[in-house]
């Protein structure tokens, strides 16, 4: 049994769906954040798979940039979540509804 | 010195005083009074120098140029304005001096003298302005200063109401005046008085223009039907009544007519004549039952202004019909001369009478009802003598001033229309009657109240102006005494050529009958009006003054107010409701809808984001 492009894309789609529904359905900001990261990694996996399939380096170059930027983003994002917790003593998103109406 | 500079000094000295008094000296009565009197004195000296030395001149400077529309500001000095300027500065100065004494115990003198100086500035401006636009500006400013001074005792509701009434009634007349000015500009393309007179000379006259300009004079000079403000204006301090509401400002309407007399047509002149005659008689009747000394004099002023208006109309019409060498459009015709002559003599004797009344009121501690006076002849001999001179001058007893000027008016009437002649003669009879009634009740008999009992003659600051004005009232009728500068006007005063004895005889006889009738009818010392006692129905009818105030009150309350309420309702419903609130309401509704989308829940936003993405995707694949 050989592992082809379709299998990689299936895994990537599955990861993306898990991340998406995590963002959509969970209330804990940290879990939502993890969902976001999952979606990001799903897209990098798809990029690597396409890169390999086409025998070009373009996708790999994108992936390097995405990983770098994601690292920075995690630092900023976690800092925001910590600041939010300090301010409101909770990280449940349904408590953060100051923009309502 | 250049004549124009002299004129500018005359004009601006009071403005400087008004500005300094109004801005800095409101709490320093003594300094403000001194400054105002100094300014009036400066105007007097500069004005008299100008009158005695200057030839007629006209200067102007461009002020505003908008495309094809040019506006010039300038001064026009001729024998007509010289005579008016003479009246304004001389009477103005005398009354300023009188005010020093009369207002000496008033804490708000700063405000009073600021108003007086502002008035002097505006009135001199009216006198010298060379175009209708500038004239209108000063015209409104005399209205403003009149308003400020009528409402001087603003803690009294009646004074405030009187000030408002004067201002609003004058607005009615001034609105017509403004329309007339616009029409003049429309027709002639200029507002300069010289050019308009010149153009009107060549036949471009319209009845409507004349009548609209006359509207301004009707308002300012208290002619029927806009006379109602002048008696109420007596709420102001007495020097104000003397200066503004007797001698100068109310005469501005007459001066305006004389200044632009060339634009009057025969039809307009007929209206002017009859309004003048009606006012002269009506106000004479109104004066008869009045008990307030100042209101009697106010109605007398209205009556004399009616004489002046009628004189202007009669003379101008005679010149128009006769087509004499001067023509109606000459700067000065018989009507202008007679009206201005009467204006001048009237300024002297009416200012004298008002200041005499002021002297009495000051001595009697602000008592104005003549039936609370009595016996003042012995207590205030100087005032009594001066007042008597003024009275005889007003009634027209020779050789005092009023005789000569009223004679000129009667001569014009005799020449034009017998009915008008006899009506004006009857007016002279009324004048004699109401003035003698005042004189008998206030001065003779025994004092009828404690205030009159304790009255005593005032100091020289008050009596000296009375004496000066009494000399003026005695001599102002002799035209030979006037300087050469006024000859342009005074030489044109009509002399009766036929019926001289008739005119003089009728005039004197009417005055004498009036005086004697009142002398025997009103008993000195009576506590009550004899007419009220013997013929109460007649008295009530006269006191009702033809219900002008009531009709206006009814009109304003029942017609105008209803219309205003209707318009206000329509405005509330359509403009304010449908358009303004409607537009705001639409935006508000949209806001309500869109606000519901902002749930504040991050999951909601993710759903919207997701749906938006799906929609974009569907769009991109062509569904």
Image: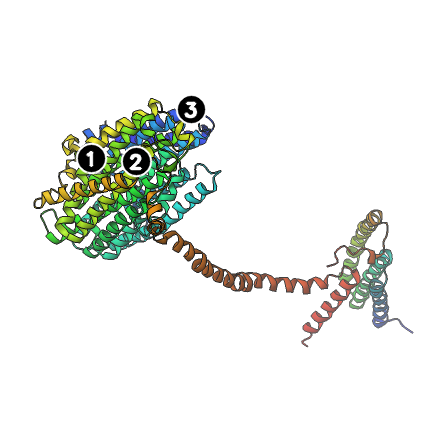
Query: Which chain is disc 3 placed on?
Result: B
- Is residue A90 visible in the rendered image? The answer is yes
Q: Is residue B312 above or below residue B355?
A: below
**Residue closest to the eye, B89 or B513:** B513
Give the residue at mark 1.
B401
Q: Residue furthest front?
A: B534
**Which residue corresponds to the image point at 28% horizontal and 46% vertical from the top-left?**
B284
CA gap, disc 1 and disc 2: 22 Å
The answer to whether the residue labelled 1 contacts the one labelled 3, judged by CB atoms less than 8 Å apart, is no
Q: Residue furthest bottom?
A: B623
Q: Earlier in the sequence, mark 1 or mark 3?
A: 3
Q: Quadrant of the C terminus of chain B?
A: bottom right
Give the residue at mark 2.
B440
**Which residue corresponds to the image point at 14% horizontal and 45% vertical from the top-left?**
B411
**Residue closest to the eye, B540 or A101:** B540
Give the residue at mark 3.
B30
Q: Quadrant of residue B512?
A: top left
**Which residue corresponds to the image point at 76% horizontal and 54% vertical from the top-left?**
A98
């Amino acid at each position: 049994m050989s592992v082809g492009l379709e299998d990689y894309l299936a895994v990537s789609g599955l990861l993306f769906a898990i991340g998406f529904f995590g963002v959509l359905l969970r209330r804990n900001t940290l879990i939502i954040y993890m969902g976001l990261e999952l979606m990001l990694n799903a897209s990098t996996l798809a990029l690597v798979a396409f890169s390999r399939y086409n025998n070009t380096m373009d996708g790999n170059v994108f992936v390097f940039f995405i990983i770098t930027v994601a690292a920075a983003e995690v630092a900023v994002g976690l800092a925001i979540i910590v600041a939010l917790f300090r301010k409101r003593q909770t990280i449940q998103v349904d408590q953060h509804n100051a923009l309502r109406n | 010195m250049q004549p124009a500079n002299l004129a500018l000094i005359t004009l601006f000295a009071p403005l400087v005083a008004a500005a300094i008094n109004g801005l800095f000296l409101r709490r320093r009565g003594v300094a403000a009074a001194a400054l105002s009197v100094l300014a009036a004195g400066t105007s007097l000296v500069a004005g008299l120098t100008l009158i005695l030395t200057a030839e007629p001149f006209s200067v102007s400077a461009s002020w505003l140029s908008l495309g094809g529309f040019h506006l010039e500001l300038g001064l026009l000095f001729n024998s007509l304005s010289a005579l008016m300027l003479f009246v304004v500065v001389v009477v103005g100065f005398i009354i300023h001096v009188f005010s020093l004494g009369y207002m000496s115990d008033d804490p708000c003198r700063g405000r009073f003298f600021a108003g007086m100086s502002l008035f002097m500035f505006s009135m001199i401006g009216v006198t010298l302005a060379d175009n209708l636009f500038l004239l209108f500006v000063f015209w409104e400013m005399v209205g403003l200063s009149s308003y400020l001074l009528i409402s001087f005792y603003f803690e009294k509701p009646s004074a405030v109401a009187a000030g408002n009434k004067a201002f609003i009634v004058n607005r009615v007349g001034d609105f017509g005046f403004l329309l007339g000015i616009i029409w003049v500009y429309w027709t002639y393309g200029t507002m300069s008085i010289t050019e308009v007179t010149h153009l009107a000379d060549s036949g471009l006259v319209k009845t409507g223009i004349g009548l609209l300009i006359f509207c301004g004079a009707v308002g300012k000079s208290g002619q029927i039907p806009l006379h109602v403000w002048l008696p109420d204006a007596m709420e102001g301090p007495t020097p104000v009544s003397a200066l503004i509401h007797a001698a100068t400002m109310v005469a501005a309407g007459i001066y305006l007519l004389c200044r632009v007399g060339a634009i009057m047509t025969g039809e307009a002149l007929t209206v002017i004549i009859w309004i003048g005659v009606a006012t002269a008689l009506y106000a004479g009747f109104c004066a008869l039952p009045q008990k307030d000394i100042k209101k009697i004099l106010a109605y007398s002023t209205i009556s004399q202004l009616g004489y002046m208006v009628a004189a202007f109309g009669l003379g101008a019409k005679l010149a128009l019909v006769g087509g004499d060498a001067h023509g109606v459009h000459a700067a000065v015709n018989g009507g202008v001369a007679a009206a201005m002559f009467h204006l001048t003599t009237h300024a002297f004797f009416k200012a004298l009478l008002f200041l005499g009344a002021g002297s009495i009121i000051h001595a009697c501690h602000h008592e104005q009802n003549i039936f609370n006076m009595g016996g003042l002849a012995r207590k205030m001999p100087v005032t009594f003598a001066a007042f008597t001179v003024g009275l005889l001058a007003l009634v027209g007893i020779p050789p005092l001033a009023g005789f000569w000027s009223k004679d000129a008016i009667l001569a014009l009437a005799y020449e034009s229309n017998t009915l008008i002649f006899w009506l004006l003669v009857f007016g002279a009879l009324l004048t004699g009657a109401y003035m003698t009634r005042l004189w008998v009740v206030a001065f003779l008999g025994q004092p009828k109240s404690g205030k009159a009992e304790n009255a005593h003659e005032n100091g020289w600051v008050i009596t000296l102006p009375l004496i000066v004005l009494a000399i003026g009232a005695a001599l102002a009728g002799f035209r030979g005494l006037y300087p050469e500068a006024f000859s342009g006007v005074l030489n044109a005063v009509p002399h009766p050529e036929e019926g001289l004895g008739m005119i003089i005889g009728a005039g004197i006889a009417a005055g004498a009958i009036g005086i004697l009738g009142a002398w025997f009818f009103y008993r000195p010392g009576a506590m009550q009006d004899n007419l009220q006692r013997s013929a109460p129905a007649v008295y009530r009818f006269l006191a009702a003054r033809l219900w002008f105030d009531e009709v206006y009150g009814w009109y304003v309350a029942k017609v105008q107010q209803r219309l205003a309420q209707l318009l206000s309702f329509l405005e509330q419903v359509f403009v304010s409701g449908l358009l303004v609130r409607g537009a705001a309401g639409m935006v508000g509704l949209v806001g309500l809808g869109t606000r519901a989308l902002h749930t504040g829940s991050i999951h909601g936003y993710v759903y919207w984001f997701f749906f938006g993405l799906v929609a974009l995707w569907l769009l991109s694949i062509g569904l």
